[in-house]
Image (tube, rainbow, N blue to C red):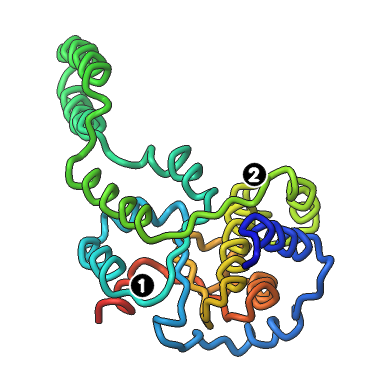
Amino acid sequence: MPDALAVRGGCIDQVCALLDRKVDISALSSLSGALKFEPPNCDLAQTVIAFDANVVLRLSKHTKCDDIVDYLRAEFPGHLVLPGQVIQEFWNNQFLAIDSISSSVQKKFKELSEAIGSFDERFADYSIRFQSLMDEFNENYGYVFDEQTARKTKLFVDLLLEKARVPFVPRTLIAASAEVRKKSKTPPGFKDGGDGDFFVWADLLLALAELKSEDVRYERVTLVTLDKKIDWSRGGIPHPILSAEIHAICGAKFETVTVDTLARRLLD
């Protein structure tokens, strides 16, 4: 039986070689396919679903969140992946978008303050006193989040904890590739200031390589994302280089979809 560390090391080497173009990719074939793009059609059992950071929060606000989570937990026959970098991206950026009780009250206060100020300058003193009170409220209760959003976000995260593969490529091994790829505008991430998208991508590729090494059969890789920048896709068509890299690592077809598309595919 192969040593687990040796197998993982082999998968990491495979990803690093691909990212650095030490192995060939079918870039021209992917471009040809993109020009007549048709969404890959295969069974859910042959599908790997991965989630971008912006989806972790957005899915919790979707009207069918509970149904999606229930289906993925109990019925989905494929495999789930959460690139390790997504956890950091979510906490550092997306998590800030969750409304706390305090932020909701702050929004109402701003509306009230603006309404009072429009009436008469004599009410300005009340606005200052309200603001002082709101600052005190935020200091004491700013950590209390909207119960429904927090519950559904945790529901989704618990599903991922139970079912998803969470890969991390060693960052020092791909740091140089990140810099070179950004300079050469190799997707993803050349539209962003940092290298977060690149690390998300590298982690996803590692998960796919590991699944392949375990003889897991799959034909479609679906990234659920809200990112519409051209370094990911154009009009819903994945960047040909991304499709070529997916094919090189595992032979599967690649697509990006929204939460709405995922909901229809799983539940309709």
Q: How many marks are shown on the rendered structure?
A: 2
Report whether 74 appears left or right of 215. left
Image coordinates of residue 34 in percent, x first then y, are 63, 83
> Taking 152 as reference, is 133 above or below it?
above
Q: Residue at x 21, y 35 (%)?
A: 104
Image coordinates of residue 91 in percent, x first then y, are 43, 39
Under mark 1, the amino acid is Leu
Give the image quarter of residue 31. bottom right
Image quadrant where one finds the N terminus:
bottom right
Q: Residue at x 74, y 50 (%)?
A: 174
Under mark 2, the amino acid is Gly
Which residue matches tag 2? 193
Pointer 2 local density, CA inside 10 Å: few below 14, some 14–19, many at least 20: few
The label number, if any, that marks residue 143 in the structure image: none
Q: Residue furthest front?
A: 1
Which residue matches tag 1? 262
Label whose residue precedes the other's in the sequence (1 or 2): 2
Q: Residue at x 69, y 87 (%)?
A: 32
Q: Residue furthest right?
A: 22
Give the foreground label among 1 and 2: 1
Report whether 249 appears left or right of 208. right
Depth order, front residue of 122/139: 139
Image coordinates of residue 120 in percent, x first then y, are 16, 19
Element carrying mark 1: helix
Q: Residue at x 46, y 82 (%)?
A: 46
> Taking 231 as reference, is 177 above or below it?
above
> Taking 50 as reference, is 171 above or below it?
above
Image quadrant where one finds the C terminus:
bottom left
